Image (cartoon, grey):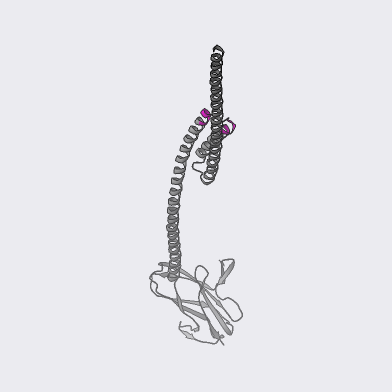
Amino acid sequence: MENKSNNSGLKAAIVVLALLLLGSIGYIYKLTTDNKETVNTLTTEKETLAEELKAKIAEYDVMIADNTALKDELQAEQAKMVELLEQVEKSKGDVAAMAKYKASYLKLKGEMDNLVAENKLLKEENVTLTSSLDSTKVVLDDAKKFNDTLLVQNEGLTKTVEKGSKLAVLNLKVLAVKERSSGKQIETDKAGRADKLKVSFLIAENQIAKTGNREYYVQIIDSKNNILGEKKTIPAGDKTLTYSFITTVKYENKTVQVNEEVAGKDFAAGTYFVNVFDKNSELVSKTSFNLR
C-alpha cells in the first residue's frame, strides 16, 4: 500500500512539473512572438519615419529654389531634418529612441508648416506687388508717351513760332536809271546809259517777330558773273558770302519799305541776278533783270 501511495505522489509531481514546463514553454514562445512583433513594428516605424524625413527634405529643396527671402531659414530647418534622418538611419530602433525621434520630427514638421505658410503668404504678396508694379509701369509708360508727345508738339510749336517769326522779304525789284545833272532819274534798260541800279523791297508785317534792327546783305551779279558794289565778304557756314551792299532796317512789327542804290558805269549787257540774304546768310529773296 505504501508503494502505491508513493507511486501516486510521484506521478502527481511529474504531472505538475510537466504542466509547469509546458506553461514555461508557452510563455517563452509568447514572449518571443511578442518581441518579434515589436521589432517588426519598430522597424516599420523607423523606415516610415525615414521616408517622411526624405520627403520633407525634398520639399525644402523646392522651396529653397523658389524663394530667396526665406532662403536662410529654409536651409537651416532643412539641415535639422537631414541631421535627424542620419540619426534615425543609424539607430537600432528601440522604443525609447523611436519615441524621441518621432517627437523631434513632429517639432520640425511644425516649424516647416509655419515656413510653408509664410512662403505662401510671400508668394501672394509678390504676385500683388508684381501686379502693382506692372500697373505702375503702364501708368509711367503712358505718362512718358504723353510727355514725349508734348515734347514733340512743343518742338513743333517752337519750330512753327520760329518759322512764323521770320520776316518775309517781298516785291524785290531792281531798276536801272540814268541820273541827270539836275538829280532827276530816268529809267532805262540800256546798259550803256545806266549809271545806277535802284534796289527796292518790302519787309512784311509780322506781329510775332521780335522788334529791332535787321540787317540784310544784297548781292548783285552782272551778266559776266561779277559782283557789283562794295564786294565785301562775310562767313557763311563753311563758305563765304560776297555782297554788294548791306542795309540796316529798324523793324517794329510793321511793313517797311527798303530803297537802296548802287552806282556804277559801263554796265554789261545781259541778265543780272539779285539775291537778298538775312544776318544768318540765308537767302530770303531773289530776282533777275535784263539790260540790253
User: Residue 219: x and y, percent?
Assistant: 54, 75
Q: Is residue 140 above or below residue 252?
A: above
Hey, which quadrant is residue 17 in on the image? Answer: top right
User: Residue 87: x and y, percent?
Assistant: 57, 31
Instruction: Depth check: give the residue in front, 58 or 240.
Output: 58
Number of callouts: 0
Instruction: Depth check: give the residue in front, 140 or 21.
Output: 21
Residue at the front extreme, as displayed = 1
Residue 170 in the figure: left or right of residue 30? left
Give me the residue at 59% from left, 68% from top: 239
Q: Is residue 12 above or below residue 117?
A: above
- Which quarter of the rendering shows the N terminus? top right
Q: Is residue 80 above or below residue 138?
A: above
Instruction: Depth check: give the residue in front, 251 or 112.
Output: 112
- What span is colored magenta in the figure? 86-98
- Which quarter of the rendering shows the C terminus? bottom right
User: Residue 32: x and y, percent?
Assistant: 56, 29
Q: Is residue 178 magenta?
A: no
Give me the residue at 46% from left, 44% from top: 119
User: Residue 90: x and y, percent?
Assistant: 59, 31
Majority secondary structure in the magenta region = helix
